[in-house]
Amino acid sequence: MKALNLSFAENEFNSQPVKTIANQFLDIKNNPEENSVEENKVVSIQDLHRAEVKAFVTKDKNLLQQYYQLRHDICTAENGWKDYDGSENEFDRQGKIIVATDKTGMVIGGARLMFSDMREYLYGETEGTQFTYKNVFKFLGIDIGNKIYGEIASFVMKADYRDRIGVEKIIEILSEESIKHRCYYVMGVSFLSRCRNYKLISSNLKSYKLKTEIVMKYPWIEKELYNYVKTFVTITSLENYFIHYDSKND
C-alpha cells in the first residue's frame, strides 16, 4: 500500500440521504419525543464528538483508498496478520463500502456490506465446506428460502474512535442499507470481542425487538491468514422489521 493523498471530495461528504423504505428506520432516531432537548441543556463532550463523525456509502476513490489503507494498517500492525493485504479486492468492487469520517473529512473507519443476490458465496464463506451461511441457517433451523441475506466484513475503526460513537455511526448506515435492500438476515464473522459490535444493529432497531445471536456452537474455520484465531458467526434477523412494515402498508 502506498502513501495517500488525504484530500477528500466535499460533495461526497455533504451528500443527502435518499428517501426509501429505510425512512421508518430513520424515524426511530428522529422521533421528537425521544430526541427532544431541554432549553439551555448543556451539550456533552460525547455529543460533540458524535456530531463530528459522519458515515455514508461511498464510491469516491480517495475515500476508498484511505479506507483500504486503514484496514491494511490495522489488520497487519494491530491484529498481526502478516500476509493480509488490505488493497481493493473483488468483494469491495461488488459490495457497498461504508466509511466514517471525522470533522476534517479524514476516514477513521469503514466496513463492507454485501448481499446474497450479488454473488453465490460471500467473503466469510468457504465454498465446498461446512463454512457457508446456508449451513448456518440449516443448523439454526431457519428456512432461508429465497430471502436475501447480507454480510458485514472488513469492519475497522481507528483506536481513538472505538468508544462506540464511530462504530455506532457505521452500524446505522449498515442497518439502513440492509433495510433498503430488503435483507432479512445480516451476518458477520469475527473473533468474539468484535462480534459484540454487531449487536448494535438490533439496538438501533430496538422498537422492533430484533435479536442478534453469536452462534457459539458453530465455530468458524480457523485460517492461517488470520493466525488461526477462533472466529464466530453473528446473525441479526430483520424479519420483525419487515413484518411490521408490510402490515402497516397493506
Image (cartoon, rainbow, N blue to C red):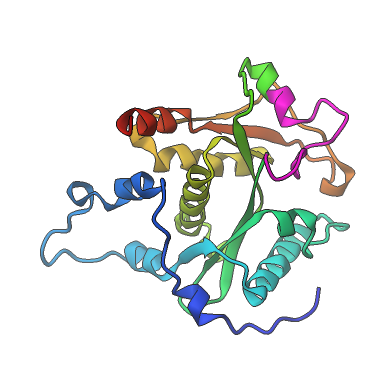
Locate residue 235, reporting x and y percent.
Answer: 59, 32
Locate residue 49, reporting x and y percent.
Answer: 39, 67
Residue at 34% from the left image edge and 44% from the top image edge: 24
- Asked if residue 129 lies in the magenta stretch, the reply is yes
- Which of the pair 221/18 is nearer the observer? 18
- Asked if residue 172 lies in the magenta stretch, the reply is no
Residue located farthest toward the top when viewing the structure as drawn: 141
Residue at 51% from the left image edge and 55% from the top image edge: 170
Residue at 82% from the left image edge and 47% from the top image edge: 226
Residue located farthest toward the front when viewing the structure as drawn: 250
Locate residue 6, reporting x and y percent.
Answer: 63, 82
User: Is residue 156 shown to the viewer in this render?
Assistant: no
Q: Quadrant of the N terminus?
A: bottom right
Q: Quadrant of the C terminus?
A: top left
User: Is residue 17 shown to the viewer in this render?
Assistant: yes
Which quarter of the picture shows residue 50? bottom left
**Prevailing secondary structure class for the magenta stretch in the rendered image:** loop
Q: Which residues are magenta?
A: 117-136
Q: Give above or below for 60 relative to 10.
A: above
Residue at 49% from the left image edge and 79% from the top image edge: 11
Q: Give above or below for 160 relative to 105.
A: above
- Which of the pair 207/120 is nearer the observer? 120
- Which of the pair 89/194 is nearer the observer? 89
Q: Is residue 24 left or right of residue 121?
A: left
Locate residue 229, reporting x and y percent.
Answer: 79, 40
